[in-house]
Amino acid sequence: MGLKCTICGSVYSPQQVTYVCPEHGVDGTLDVQYDYDRVAAHLMDAQWAELRSMWRYMALLPVEPETARRLVTGNVLSSVGWTPLYPVERLAQRLGLRHVWIKDDGRQPTASLKDRASAIAIAKAREGGYTTITTASTGNAAAALAGLCAAVAQPCVIFCPRTAPEAKVTQLLVYGAQVLLVDGTYDQAFDLCLAAAPEFGWYNRNTGYNPYMSEGKKTVALEICEQLGDGWSWRAPDVVLVPVGDGCIIGGVHKGLSDLLALVDAWKRGLDAAEMAPVPVDTVADSIAAGLPRDRIKAMRAVRESGGAFLSVTDDEILDAIPALAQASGVFAEPAAAAAYAGLARAADGGIVDREDRVVVLVTGSGLKDVPAAKRAVGEPTVIRPRLEDVRQALHAG
Ligand SMILES: *Cc1c(COP(=O)(O)O)cnc(C)c1O
Ligand SMILES: [Zn+2]
């Protein structure tokens, strides 16, 4: 396994470098490279392939099999991944498309896709002999770390912006994490966490800094291809809709697809994101409120190399998407996750997605994470007195 700088292309061994390129500092995020010949021979080794979790892709994960075997047995870590993929015909029809699926990562142990990354962080911290893990988070990465750490009695320290939704912060406290609510933005919490980790000797899970987080997140793409396929014959979708904050999920989805291809080819370099300037953020979708996307190089490359597109959607479109998605599929998404569906509605309108395309909408987190936002979309229920007459009236008013 090698770690290749996304800016200069230098390759380091995991023993040499823990997080980022020594030449390029925090901007020098690293890609994990594998010996694809070896991986091809072991991709679906029987002992791992029988697991209904992300660990079934062991040969494509940056973790020693021994670590996984010891850590991921009989606890919540063993349930990360292998979330359902549903065909959603009514949604497809409404958008004038023929093939749409929802990948429901609200069904992870802590109710967001972030579990895929936090699981890897715990394994890497164990391999590195760290006693404490830390992360900055808009909420879900922290909840994922806190929950999975609780499963294996691993101490963690969390930095969240004070504005994080109450449900997410409460989830952290319930799991027993040490929570530090930073009176500032996510970006400030991120920088503070970066400074604290070396100061106190903690392992740092931060998105776009820790090179292994996209490796965990890429398993969602491997699963989609396997679930769309038939037995050993996997099939990639034409389009995947991904909500983007720091860019780690979209980078991870691309990495998963690329790993599958490049079990053949080498990476091209991505430089244009290096010059990006921070922007002020103000959105109902807290999980994607990142002013300076920390994994922007991988995110830009994902969209460029796949011939994709970035779309922005308004808060109103996001709020409308929450009940629209739920009522057509039974999947309740948090605002950031509903943004992917709002994006599909725009893409279908604008001809970015073709009628015949096979489309997967990645629902990255559960709607129960942010009930007040959902409430803004659906308002209040009807209250009646306990009388049949009131039922009749309510049905007529309905
Ligand atoms: C973190 C998160 C995102 C954005 O992922 P990035 O890797 O920051 O781009 C989207 N949706 C949900 C629910 C999330 O928790
Ligand atoms: Zn470099």
Image (cartoon, helix red, strand yellow):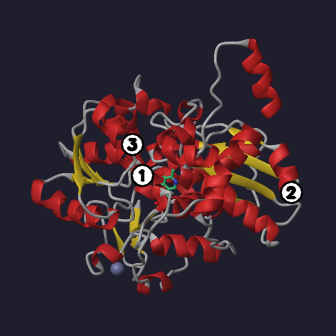
For badge 2, the amino acid type reads Leu
Q: Residue 15 appears in which quarter of the rendering? A: bottom left
Q: Residue 351 appears in which quarter of the rendering? A: bottom right
| Mark earlier in primary sequence (2, 1) | 1
For badge 3, the amino acid type reads Lys
Q: Position of residue 43 (x, y in %)?
A: 58, 46
Horizontal placement of 341 versus 275: left or right? right
Q: What element carries label 3?
A: helix
Residue occupying the point 56% across, 30% down: 51
Closest to the observer, 173 or 360: 173
Which numbered marker is on residue 168? 3
Q: Where is residue 152 in the image (x, y as percent from the top left)?
A: 30, 30
Which numbered marker is on residue 62? 1
Closest to the observer, 325 or 239: 325
For badge 1, the amino acid type reads Pro
As displayed, is residue 2 above or below residue 358?
Answer: below
Q: Residue 292 appears in which quarter of the rendering? A: bottom left
As displayed, is residue 208 above or below residue 100?
Answer: below
For marks 1 and 3, give the CA distance.
28 Å
Which numbered marker is on residue 97? 2
| Mark earlier in primary sequence (2, 3) | 2
Q: Where is residue 215 in the image (x, y as percent from the top left)?
A: 47, 55
Is residue 190 visible in the rendered image? The answer is: yes
Q: Nearer the viewer, mark 2 or mark 3?
A: 3
| Label 1 crowd bin: few (<14), some (14–19), many (20+), radius 10 Å | many
